[in-house]
Amino acid sequence: MIDAANRSTPQEVGGKAASLLRLQAEGWRVPPFFVIPAETHRQHSDGRVPPALAAQITAQWRALGGDTHPFAVRSSGVAEDSADNSFAGVFTTVLDVRGEAALIAAVEACWGSHRSPEAAAYRAARAITSDDAMAVIVQRMIEASWSGVCFTADPLTQALSVTVVNAVRGGADKLVSGLVNPDTIRLNGASGEILERSGAADERVPRFMLDEVVRTSAAIAKAYGFPQDVEWAFDSEGLWLLQSRPITTVAAVHYNRPIEPWGEAGDPDAPERVWTRAYADEIWSPPVSPIFYDIQYIGGVVTDYLSRSGDDAPTPADIFKYYRAAAYCDVDPLERMYACLPPLARRPGIYTLFPTERHAALKAAPWRWRGLLRRLWQFEVKYGAGWGLTRNYRFLAAAWPSFLARATELRAVDVTTLDEAALATHTNDIWTLAGSVSIECGVAVLYYGHDLKLVLTGLLERWCGEGEQLYGAVSAGLAASETVRESDGIWAIAEQIKAAGAQSAASALDLAAFRQQAQALGAGDAVRSFEAFLAEHPHRGANYKDVIHPRWGDDPELLWAQVRAFLGAGARPSHANAAAAERRRAAQSLALASVRGALAPVRRQVLRVLFRYNEIYTGLRDNHRYYYDHVWWMLRRTFVEKGRRLLAAGRLKRADDVFFLNRGEQAELATGGLSASTAAERIAVRREEWEATRLRLPPKFLRRGYVPDDGESPAPAEGRLTGQPASPGQARGRARVIYDISELSRVAPGEILVTRQTDPSWTPVFSRLGGLVLETGGVLAHGASLCREFGLPCVTALDRATERVRDGQSVALDGGAGTVDLL
C-alpha cells in the first residue's frame, strides 16, 4: 500500500493518484485516502483480491474511518489523466462503499475495468502501449453541500483566458451522470468577471464558493504548469479537492502560446473575433515551423500598411496567432487593409480570405482615397529614392550585387568553429544584411506587386470584359527570371550527362555513386558543372522557404534529384519562357485593341503603363526570393548549429528539435531558464501538429477562440471544385497529389500536379506537367507565376485540394475559369 505521505510517479500509482498525492503534499485539502499501487495489480493479473491482500486493504480502510464513513473506490490507470490521454469515463469508480465485502468487490471492479472493451478500444484508437496496469484509490467521501468541476481553460473553445465551472447541489455523481442540469459559469480567469451563466436562478452556487474554487484551481494550474480540470466539493468544513488532471484538449494551444511575440498583450480568445488562415498562407505556407513563424512574424507590417494608407485606428497586438502549425490573421485588420483599395481592385479572390458573412461589409466599405494620397507622398517624396514606383526596382537592382557579395562572405563562415559570442555576432551580421534591403523588398512585394495586380485586374475587367483570366495572359513569360536562369543551369547539366551517354547511369545512381563513376562514364564535365552550380546555389532547393527545410547546400542529393528530373525533359526552360513572352505580348495587344469609347486612347495608355510596371514588380516579386533565400539558408545553418550544441549538452533529444522552439526559448534552454523537460513537452506537441499539417490543412477560419470553421466541406468523389483562376488554359489528365519535393519523381509527363504550395526548387517538374492545382496562395504565388512562364493552366486557392482530389484520379482543369472537374 502507498499512503498519502509518499510522493509517487504515475508509473507506480497512475495519473489520478499521483495528482492526489501531489495535491496533498503541496498542502491542498484532499479527503483522506490510500492507494493500491499498479504493481499489486500486475501481481494479481486474474483480477481477484486474495485473502492476505484483502486484510491489508481493510486494515488501511479502517484506519481512515471505514467503519463510520462511506468511501469512494476509484481507478487510476498508469496512462490515465496525462496531458495526452484522459481516459475520461473509461474506467470504473464505485461510490458510497460501505463494509469490507463491498470494499473488496469495488477494488476488483476497478481492476476489471482495465480489461474492458471500452478501455481496449480507447488504447487502440490512441496507440497507447504504456497502460499495462491499474492502481486503485480508496478515499473517504465528502458529504457535500455543493460540488462540481472547474476547468481553468475552456475545453470547448480552447480559450486559455476563460475558466468554466459546473456546480450542483450535493455530490458530484449527479453532475457526472447527467441527472441534473448544473449551474454553468464561464468567467474571465484573470478578473473573475462572469461572462456567461446558465441554470435556474435558485440553483446557483454561492459566490463565495465560486470565488474560492476559481482561485484555488488557478493556483493549482499555475503550480502544475498546465491548465487543469479540478473536481471539488464543499462541506461544513470548507473546500475539498477530489481530483486535478490536465485538460487534454488545450495542450496544443497551451504549448504554442510561448511562441507568440505579443505575450500577455494579446486577446486571442475573445469570442467576437474571427480568424482566417487564407491570408497568412500567402506569407507562411503551412505547416509553419515555430522558429519560422517567429522570425517572419509580420504583425507590424499590417499595422504599417494601414497607417500609411490613412487608417490610424488602433490595431490589436495579436494580429496573427499560431495554431496547428499555421498562422491565422484577425479578419478585422485584414478587412481594413482591403478597404484601402478602390472598389474595382477588390477582386473575387480577396473575398475567399473572409467568411461569407463579411463579404457584404467589405464590398460596401468606402475607399480611403485620402490615405492613398498620404501613401503617395511618403513613397514618392519622403522616401522616393528607395520606395518610389519608378525608383524602387532600380534601387534593388543596384543593391543586389553588393548584397550577393556580402552573402557570399557570410556563407563562407564555418559556424561550427564559432564560440557562442561569435555565433551571435554572425547571426546579427546576417540580420544586418537582410535589413539592408528588407524595407525596399517589402515595398516592392507587399505594395507594388500586390496592389498592381489587383488594380490591373479590375481595370481589365471593366475596360476589356475579362479580369483574372486576362491578367494571367498579360503577365506571362517575364524577362530576366532568376528561376528560369536557375532551371536552365540544371537543364544544361542534364544535357551534358545525356551528351556523354550517361543518362541511364545517372537515372539509376545516387550522387555519390555517380561522382565515383563519372570519369569512366565520360561525364566528368557534367560533374564539374554540377559542383560549380552547387557552389553558386547552395541556398536554394528547399521544399518551401521555411528554415526547417534543407537546401541543396545541406543535402546535394536534393539538387541531383532535380538534375535527374530533367533527363527526360524536353524544351529548355528559357525557350518555354520565351514562348510564353510571345503569348504575353499578343494578349496585351488584344487587350489594348478591345478598349473602346471616347476615352480609349487614355485608357490604353494607362494599361500600357500598368502592363510595364506589373511585369517589373511581378518579376521582382519572384526574383527577390533568389537573393533573400541566402538569408533563410544562413539563418538555418545557425539554428542547425544551435541544435547540435543543445543536443550535445543533453538539452534536446534530437538536433532538429531546435526548429520547434522560437529564439527566446532556444536562449532560455541554453542558459537553463527553460528546463529540458518543459522544452521536450512543447516540442513533442508542436512536432506532432507540424507532421499532421503536412497531410491535412487546419481549418480555414477560427471562431470563439479556436472553434474550427472550414468554410466549405470536402466535395463528393465526382463534381466540380472551384478555386481562383491563376493561369489560363485547359488540361485533362491524371491528378498526382504531392506533399513534398522529395515526391516529385512520381509525377509523370502530362499529369496534373495537386499540392499545397510550390517553391522555386520545384521548377524542373514544370517542364513535364499538364497543369497545376494549389491549395494556398493567389495569382502571384510562385507556382501560378511559373505556370504562366510555361504556358500551363493553374488553379490556386482551392481549399483542401489534396484531400478532395484523389491521387491518380482523372481531372479536367480550366485555369481561366478556376475550376477542376473530377471525372
Image (spheres, rainbow, N blue to C red):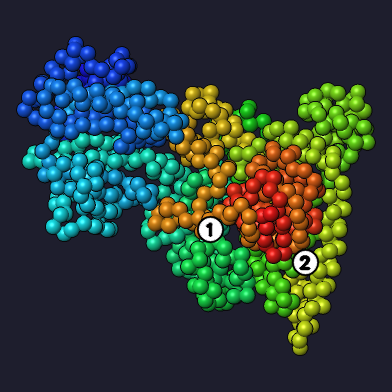
Horizontal arrangement in the rendering, residue 562 relative to residue 218 (left or right): right
Secondary structure of the residue carrying numbered label 1: loop
Looking at the image, residue 595 lies above or below residue 689: below
Identified at 87% across, 49% down, the residue is 571
Identified at 37% across, 39% down, the residue is 248
Q: Nearer the viewer, residue 349 or 53?
A: 53
Q: Quadrant of the C terminus?
A: bottom right
Q: Which residue is mark 2?
A: 474
Identified at 67% across, 30% down, the residue is 414
Give how far across and how far down residue 683 sits, in percent.
48, 35
Residue type beneath disc 1? Glu
Horizontal arrangement in the rendering, residue 83 relative to residue 71 (left or right): right
Inter-mark Cα distance, 1 to 2: 32 Å
Horizontal arrangement in the rendering, residue 598 relative to residue 579 (left or right): left
Viewer-side label of 1, 2: 1
- Asked if residue 617 can be seen in this view, the reply is no
Residue type beneath disc 2? Val
Give how far across and how far down residue 815 sits, in percent.
72, 61
> Which mark is first along the chain, 2 or 1?
2
Q: Which residue is mark 1?
A: 712
Looking at the image, residue 324 lies above or below residue 123: below
Q: Nearer the viewer, residue 202 or 173?
A: 173
- The reply to whether dot 1 and dot 2 touch (C-beta < 8 Å) is no
